Image: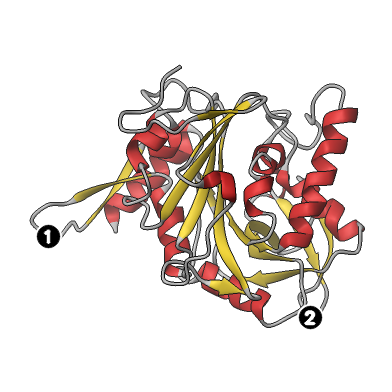
Amino acid sequence: MVPPAGESNWQRGDDLWRVWKGLQSGMPHNPSTTRLCAGRDVVALIPAAGSGTRIAPIPGSKEVFPIGFANVEGDKPEVKVVSQYLFDLMVAGGVGQGIIVLRDGKWDIPAYFGEGEPAGMKLSYVVVGQTLGPPDTLDRAHAFVRHNVVAFGFPDIMLGPPDVFDQLLTRMDTGDVDVVLGLYDVLDPGHSDIVELDEKDHVLGIHLKDATSILPYCWGCAVWGPAFTEFMHSAVQEHRDSTAGSFGTIDAGGDLPMGLLFKQAVEANMKVVGVPFDGQHWTDVGSPRSLLHMAEKLRSQ
């Protein structure tokens, strides 16, 4: 296996390749490029280790599939790939550095984003083999984010508002909390993780893919601190050691779902709160039909 052109600093791990100049020493503090939250640098953490079976076949990774344009009124319109919309939201929230955790073979992602100029932030990559699902994927970067505040979103989920991560990070900065969830209007409870709140927006429970729920909110993105990073690290290890079969009853693809880790954190009495974005909903563009609908919506704007 060879690195992308221009990269010579690949280091072999037990089950992964790490791509990043200086990653071995963790994410560096650079106050000129990234926001501080609760006294810690904020790092974007993006899972991109899926096989894309729902949207296959496409000529590359869905994260870098062209879906829209920027600068359409200028002399040279710029193509925007699916994951660019998530990066735009994070950059608008002051996040200036990030890690993409990708599956072995998805070299078109680092080839496109490189050191991060197209994303608007400094990027590094952790490359993994088979994982149980998004929490396991994210946990492969544990050593590099364990002391940071993490900004998390799925690269194939389109959401808003434009200041979503600014609001989530501000909420975390103003209260003693472990996790802040971005909450959206429920369109299909059977395909959403429903979030139950009290009157102060503290999370009381999370109901995974509950088609019978009449609660109004589901989560779509999140930020969290080191306490949840350590909680997830331990929980994922337990799932690795004990899981037999799949998570098919709570995830259509049989993966360990991120919502389960949030649910377990609430049940473990971690401090989880929500920020509702009334009138907003997220869109999963990981299937051909949803990708078509979103591309048509973007063209009409």
Residue 115 visible in the displayed image: yes
- Residue 59: image x %, image y %? 36, 23
Residue sitting nearer the eye, 108 or 77: 108
The residue drawn where x is 37% and y is 46% is 115
- Residue 193: image x %, image y %? 73, 51
Please determine whether, in this image, residue 18 is positioned above or below residue 147.
above
Residue type at the position of mark 2: Lys
Name the residue tied to disc 2.
Answer: 200
The residue drawn where x is 79% and y is 26% is 246
Residue 74: which numbered mark, if any?
1
Q: Total of numbered circles in the picture? A: 2
In primary-sequence order, the first of circles 2 and 1 is 1
Can you tell which quarter of the image residue 198 is in? bottom right
Residue 107: which numbered mark, if any?
none
The residue drawn where x is 49% and y is 47% is 22
Can you tell which quarter of the image residue 170 is in? bottom right
Residue sitting nearer the eye, 243 or 62: 243
Q: Secondary structure at mark 2?
A: loop
Residue type at the position of mark 1: Gly
Residue 211 visible in the displayed image: no
Q: Is residue 239 left or right of residue 170?
A: right
The residue drawn where x is 72% and y is 46% is 258
Please determine whether, in this image, residue 141 is positioned above or below residue 109.
below
Please determine whether, in this image, residue 220 is positioned above or below residue 35.
above
Q: Secondary structure at mark 1?
A: loop
- Residue 14: image x %, image y %? 67, 25
Quadrant of the image containing the C terminus: bottom left
